[in-house]
Amino acid sequence: MLEIKEVDKSFGGVKAVCDCSLRVEEGSITGLIGPNGAGKTTLFNVITGYYKPDTGSILFEGEGIDGLPPHQIFRKRIYRTFQITREFAQMTVLENVMLMPENQIGEKIWNIWFRPASVRRQEKTIQEKALEVLEFVELIDLKDEYAGSLSGGQKKLLELARSMMAEPRMVLLDEPGAGVNLTLMKKLMANIRKLCEEKKITFFLIEHDMDLVMNLCNPVIVMSEGKMLAEGTPEEIKNDERVLEAYLGGQYR
Ligand SMILES: Nc1ncnc2c1ncn2[C@@H]1O[C@H](COP(=O)(O)OP(=O)(O)OP(=O)(O)O)[C@@H](O)[C@H]1O
Ligand SMILES: [Mg+2]
């Protein structure tokens, strides 16, 4: 579904992503792990159009998407969440979730004047869906709170909720479990699995929590120093010497 071919991305002298090639199969929950600074978030930023790759290509269902701006990638129904959450702090949790779908009729000014009934109807459907999604991630009790007042873990769940509104084909999650407590983490994993199976959403997720990765993801891809180091089943990755080496090497060098 997604194919990354020999992608490079440098920042000045720092080679964040370097000759990186990998694939994400349709219908999979593919994990992306690797030491801090391995280039995982940068790779997500390149895939979703936040950065242009210096070289290489990115194919989504066989079609080149590298160099497209984020909103055009979004139109292909590839959605992503951020390692550092990006909620609208001054808006409520519910409003944040309702903002997601694009092409809302109400956004066009002439519709508000000339088609008020259809605008109201659409807003109602969006609100119903937003409430359903908030129920799903267990943020429903906080729907009227300002998003800025949520805890770190709750903001992560809000990001997941927003990604569910957009009806994506592929979701890229950057550390969805960071700061989320164990109970919610289990729920989060169950939800991701359910979205994959029932809604046929493909997931590509970065995570440092090995429990989450090893229980949820297959295959697991390991990135180190900007490139793909290994790919395999959780079992294979756990027993791969090179992976251990990459983590220890990075930590203690
Ligand atoms: N906008 C930027 N400007 C300059 N350097 C950057 C930028 N973004 C990332 N880098 C550098 O690129 C390298 C890879 O960073 P990246 O954030 O992709 O790592 P990561 O694998 O996501 O790490 P972590 O697990 O800590 O989130 C790092 O050395 C980082 O300092
Ligand atoms: Mg990162």
Image: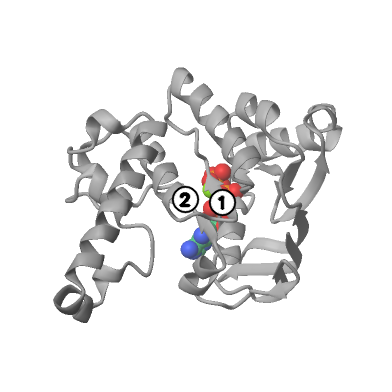
At x 24%, y 28%, the residue is 141
Above-or-below relation of 93 to 10: above
Residue nearer the viewer, 210 or 90: 90
Q: Is residue 173 left or right of residue 220?
A: left
Residue 17 appears in the figure: yes
Determine which of the numbered discs, if any, sits on residue 81 in the image: 2
Tell me the quarter of the picture where residue 180 sits.
top left
Give the image location of residue 181, x and y in percent.
43, 22
Residue 82 appears in the figure: no
Give the image location of residue 226, x and y in percent.
69, 56
Q: Is there a contact, CB below 8 Å, between mark 1 and mark 2?
A: yes
Q: Earlier in the sequence, mark 1 or mark 2?
A: 2
Mark 2, Cα crowd under 10 Å, few <14 / some 14-19 / many 20+, is many
Mark 1, Cα crowd under 10 Å, few <14 / some 14-19 / many 20+, is many
Q: Is residue 208 left or right of residue 239?
A: left
Determine which of the numbered discs, if any, sits on residue 171 in the image: 1
At x 32%, y 53%, the residue is 126
At x 59%, y 34%, the residue is 194
